Image (spheres, rainbow, N blue to C red):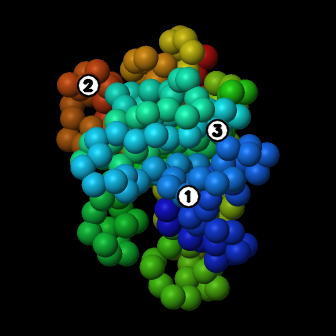
Amino acid sequence: MYTEFYRATANGSTVARSLMEEFPNDEETWLIDNQFMFGPALMICPVTVEGAVDRQVYFPPSARWFDVHAQYFAEVTPKGLQTVPAPLENIPLYIRGGHVIPMQDPGNDTYHQKLLQPFLLIVAPDADGLASGSLFWDRNGVDDLSLGNYQLMEFSASKGSLSSRLVHQFPIGVQMQLFGLQVLGVATKPANVIVNEWQEEAVYVQQRLALRQQPGGGGPQESAKGQLELTDISARVFKSASWQ
């Protein structure tokens, strides 16, 4: 979300936008006013009817969609107009294929705490196995962008690999620390997973590949949800990963 506001500042793009803006050739999106995109990657579908426990959502067929609230970020099939669950505790939220989304563990809203909190990368490939994304973070200062006090990273995924590129580095030399990587829509279990040129173990469940660091752990463990926990990912600055 913070990165989308950076993009709006840097190039004038919209943050919240209609589906028509992202899918101008899909006439079904032209009149939809009760679901919207947050940037190009997230589709938010709020419930506006009192007492409703489900709602209709239109999934543009030209994209691949993953359900954030479903177990293992299940892919949405079929597409088009569908009725989806909308319990009180969850707003229907979907990741569009073709994007890499960075997430950060919550912490105190201070400059130093923000730098220390590790990141998770979610890779949601499109139908061709491609995805891209970026991460902008700064000190929350008014003049950080103009003074260059920020870090900007770009991520690019193709079939079986993910790489990062440092576009702009914090002057103080702080690096993004990765504690987890999730790749959605992986058709078959990989035989090898490499992170920063080191071979890693990973859990593969229902077309989702997951690597995650468990703070304070003593080595690889199976979590309650079957996700393998790796204790050493966060010690390294993320550069690249591959799965074959």
**Residue under the point 34% across and 53% down:** 49
Quadrant where the C terminus is found in the figure: top right
Secondary-structure class at tag 2: loop
**Residue under the point 47% across and 84% down:** 141
Precedes in sequence: disc 3 or disc 1: 1
Q: Residue 225 has which mark?
A: 2
Kind of residue sitting beneath label 1 = Asp
The mark closer to the camera, 2 or 3, is 3
Residue 23 placed where, x, y %?
72, 48
Q: Residue 60 has which mark?
A: 3
| CA neighbours of label 3 inside 10 A, class few (<14), some (14 to 19), many (20+) | some
Residue 222 seen from this side: yes
The mark closer to the camera, 3 or 1, is 1
Q: In the rendered view, tell whether residue 161 sits above or below residue 100.
A: above
What residue did someone put label 1 on? 33
Kind of residue sitting beneath label 2 = Lys
Precedes in sequence: disc 2 or disc 1: 1
* Rendering quarter of residue 85: top left
- In whole angstroms, how far apart are the C-alphas of marks 2 and 3? 31 Å
